[in-house]
Image: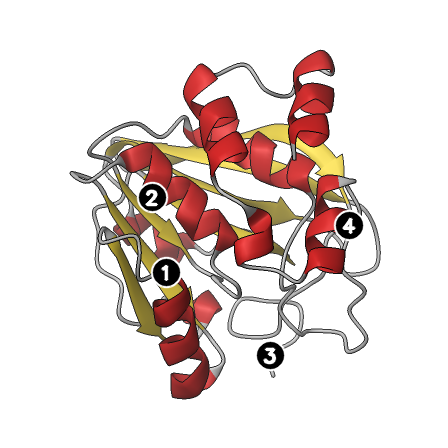
Amino acid sequence: REDAVRRLLQGGVLRSESIVAALLSVRAEDFLSEPEADAMYRDRWPDIKTEGLAPPWLSISAYALALEAFNPSAGMRMADLLGQRGYFAALLAALVGDDGQVQVLCSEGRRTKRALAKQLKGFKQVNVIAGAATEVEGLAGDFDGVFFPGALPAIPTSWQKLLLDNGGQVVTFVGPRFGVQDMVAAIQRNGAMGERVIARMRVPIVAGLHGWLRA
């Protein structure tokens, strides 16, 4: 964990002291198996055998870039649309503090929701909701930030209703089904969305409404 944070600092990916502190204090090993956590810290990606299945985790660089784009602080309201294991939600919870809120969508049924809620029970500001990630079921705005860790053809316009009108943003991955995608931050201001590219990387696509695969 410390080696990964040091590497990200040296590479200029990490700039915020609060994000560095969160990455050092939240243990990925509490949410992933030890081999998975080790691979994540080494900037590797999960091996997805079936196209369309949600990735259980992303590389540490992807998480760090997302956090730097959001720059979450105390009291913010954040959403993780694909909280498969809960690691990123735990990072967000550490950053928004007791006065903030983190909503987590779990897309694999009630049993997984119960397991994820149990995993995150130490974070009182986290609420786990069962629902299809791309359809944002059960969520209602206004969020400072919304994270979707999978590749989409485009950011759904319907997601705008989840965001604060002035400064709310989505961080996700947009691009081709079988190629490298753009990691983008789309910020809403006065009802209009402006996108900027953060990085380029290839991430798994996620099946569902608005995705490359409908089911």
Q: Position of residue 44 (x, y in %)?
A: 80, 47
Measured in 3D between alpha carbons, the distance from the residue under mark 4 to the one under mark 3, in whole angstroms, is 30 Å
Dot 1 and dot 2 residues touching (CB under 8 Å): yes
Dot 2 and dot 3 residues touching (CB under 8 Å): no
Measured in 3D between alpha carbons, the distance from the residue under mark 1 to the one under mark 2, in whole angstroms, is 10 Å
Quarter holding the N terminus?
top right
Q: Nearer the viewer, mark 3 or mark 1?
A: 1
Mark 2, other Cα within 10 Å: few <14 / some 14–19 / many ≥20 = many
Looking at the image, residue 35 sits to the left or right of residue 90; the answer is: right
Label disc, if present, on residue 214 of the rendered structure:
3
Q: Which residue is mark 2?
A: 93
Measured in 3D between alpha carbons, the distance from the residue under mark 3 to the one under mark 1, in whole angstroms, is 30 Å
Three-letter code for the amino acid on which mark 4 is drawn: Ala
Looking at the image, residue 17 sits to the left or right of residue 41; the answer is: left
Q: Which residue is mark 1?
A: 120
Mark 3, other Cα within 10 Å: few <14 / some 14–19 / many ≥20 = few
Label disc, if present, on residue 39 of the rendered structure:
4
Is 172 situated above or below 136? above
Q: Could you say whether the residue bearing mark 3 is in a helix, strand or loop?
A: loop
